[in-house]
């Protein structure tokens, strides 16, 4: 215990990297280590195909995430691709990676999880385009592997072939989808959190963050969280109840949900769903215990009291169908609904800009705008910026 405390106090970066390497398959422990490291001002960098090693490595006041800690990639496969990189240099692009690694030891799930975890961001930042290209990349890997076996080389040269291959243009992942896929690949949120865009509106609604709980003296609190796991059980009397694991940008917490609330709110209790919880707080020694008395969908709560409008500045008309797709998620249910309540929803204005002209277009109808939708629009290619008004 003394040695552990000494190492943590005097060599914290090395301590955390070593501890995380020992528990690289335990995402619950990794998440705790990451939060503890961040609390000590130690940066935890995302996995990087050209920078990460098989296990966790250290930089200057930095921990570099381990490739083998990504789900469903296989430690031996990561050993092989790191060895290839060490021998022949960094991977130049995604096609260079496929050609050099070959089909041995890689499959669609491995590529999908590396992409979702952000390991290829150094080669291509649009993860949706990479994800769309997985089958093509596997085909390239197979061809390269077969050519190596047969001792063949391409007649046209590697550079020309590489330049002829391109990734398709596809709809980019929204920030929430990007984080959700990252969560599935890593086991927790690393590069951000789905509630990041909600901080202002949650503060306005007097919703506490998890880190505020220890100083709170209220018996009942409002908390927001994204569901990470749900463990449903039955009491001795046969009544269902559940332990709900949630996270917000400041930490993880758990609440018990008894049968009445569980049965009434089951449709919104799924992993990845963001909710607002009215909870009763109790303390046993130093442990905080929460009992959910009501659970509501975060987006529904925000939309019910929100008539925010948007001004979307666009430089490329190819973004328009993607903007429409995001807005349709928040569209009022019907024209009748709008007529009955003219104050419901906000107005969306598109400002098309180029070097010579600016055209302003107000979209018909009203829309329920929330931070998730405005954040998704901001992330679209061709959108310059978004103003919430």
Image (cartoon, grey):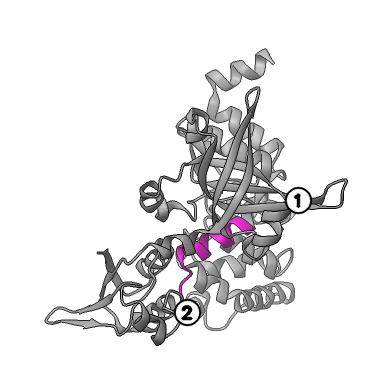
Q: How far apart are marks 1 and 2 (CA)?
A: 42 Å
Give the label, 1 or 2, closer to the camera: 1
Q: In front here: 171 or 310?
A: 310
Q: Is residue 268 left or right of residue 361?
A: right
Residue at the spot x=50%, y=33% of the render?
218
Residue lying furthest front: 340
Where residue 116 sits: x, y (%)? 57, 62
Image quarter in which the N terminus is found: top right
Which residue is labeled 2 in the image?
Answer: 170
Is residue 368 positioned above or below 278 on the image? below
Q: Is residue 119 visible?
A: no
Where residue 238 sits: x, y (%)? 86, 52
Q: How many labels does the image show?
A: 2
Q: Earlier in the sequence, mark 1 or mark 2?
A: 2
Residue at the spot x=74%, y=66% of the render?
104
How dense is the environment of label 2, judged by Cα within 10 Å: few (below 14), some, or many (20 and up)?
A: few
Q: In this view, does 66 lie to the left or right of 130?
A: right
Q: Report helix, strand or loop for mark 1.
A: strand
Is residue 137 positioned above or below 40 on the image? below
Q: Quick check: is 170 in the magenta stretch?
A: yes
Q: Quick check: is 312 in the magenta stretch?
A: no
Which residue is labeled 1 in the image?
Answer: 241
Is residue 381 positioned above or below 114 on the image? below
Where residue 248 sits: x, y (%)? 52, 47
Q: In front here: 336 or 132?
A: 336
Q: In front here: 294 or 141?
A: 294
Q: Is residue 237 left or right of residue 327?
A: right
Residue at the spot x=41%, y=78% of the render?
331
Where residue 353 sits: x, y (%)? 19, 78
Q: Which residues fall within the magenta stretch?
A: 165-184
């Amino acid at each position: 215990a003394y040695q552990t405390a000494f190492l943590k106090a005097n060599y914290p970066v090395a301590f955390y990297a070593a501890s995380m390497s020992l528990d690289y398959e335990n995402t619950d422990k990794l998440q705790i280590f990451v939060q503890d490291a961040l609390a000590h001002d130690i940066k935890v960098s995302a996995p990087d195909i050209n920078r990460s090693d098989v296990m966790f490595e250290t930089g200057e006041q930095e921990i570099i995430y381990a490739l083998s800690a990504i789900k469903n990639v296989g430690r031996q496969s990561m050993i092989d691709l790191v060895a290839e990189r060490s021998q022949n240099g960094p991977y130049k692009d995604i096609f260079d990676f496929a050609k050099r690694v070959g089909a041995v030891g890689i499959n669609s799930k491995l590529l999908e999880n590396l992409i979702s975890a952000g390991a290829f961001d150094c080669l291509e930042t649009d993860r949706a385009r990479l994800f769309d290209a997985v089958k093509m990349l596997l085909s390239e890997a197979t061809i390269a592997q077969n050519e190596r076996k047969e001792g063949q080389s391409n007649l046209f040269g590697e550079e020309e072939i590489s330049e002829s291959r391109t990734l398709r243009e596809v709809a980019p992942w929204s920030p929430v989808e990007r984080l959700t896929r990252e969560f599935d690949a890593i086991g927790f949120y690393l590069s951000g959190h789905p509630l990041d865009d909600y901080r202002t509106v949650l503060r306005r609604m007097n919703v506490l963050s998890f880190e505020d709980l220890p100083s709170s003296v209220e018996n009942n609190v409002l908390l927001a969280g994204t569901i990470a796991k749900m463990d449903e059980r039955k009491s001795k009397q046969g009544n269902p109840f559940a332990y709900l694991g949630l996270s917000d940008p400041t930490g993880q917490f758990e609440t018990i949900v008894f049968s009445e609330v569980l049965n009434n709110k089951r449709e919104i209790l799924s992993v990845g769903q963001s909710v607002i919880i009215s909870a009763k707080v109790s303390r046993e020694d130093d442990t905080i215990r929460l009992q959910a008395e009501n659970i509501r969908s975060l987006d529904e709560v925000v939309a019910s009291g929100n008539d925010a409008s948007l001004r979307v500045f666009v430089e490329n008309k190819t973004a328009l169908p993607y903007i429409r797709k995001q807005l349709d998620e928040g569209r009022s249910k019907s024209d009748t609904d709008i007529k009955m309540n003219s104050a419901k929803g906000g107005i969306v204005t598109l400002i098309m800009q180029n070097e010579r002209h600016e055209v302003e277009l107000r979209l018909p109808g009203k829309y329920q705008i929330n931070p998730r939708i405005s954040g998704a629009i901001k992330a679209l290619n061709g959108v310059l910026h978004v103003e919430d008004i």
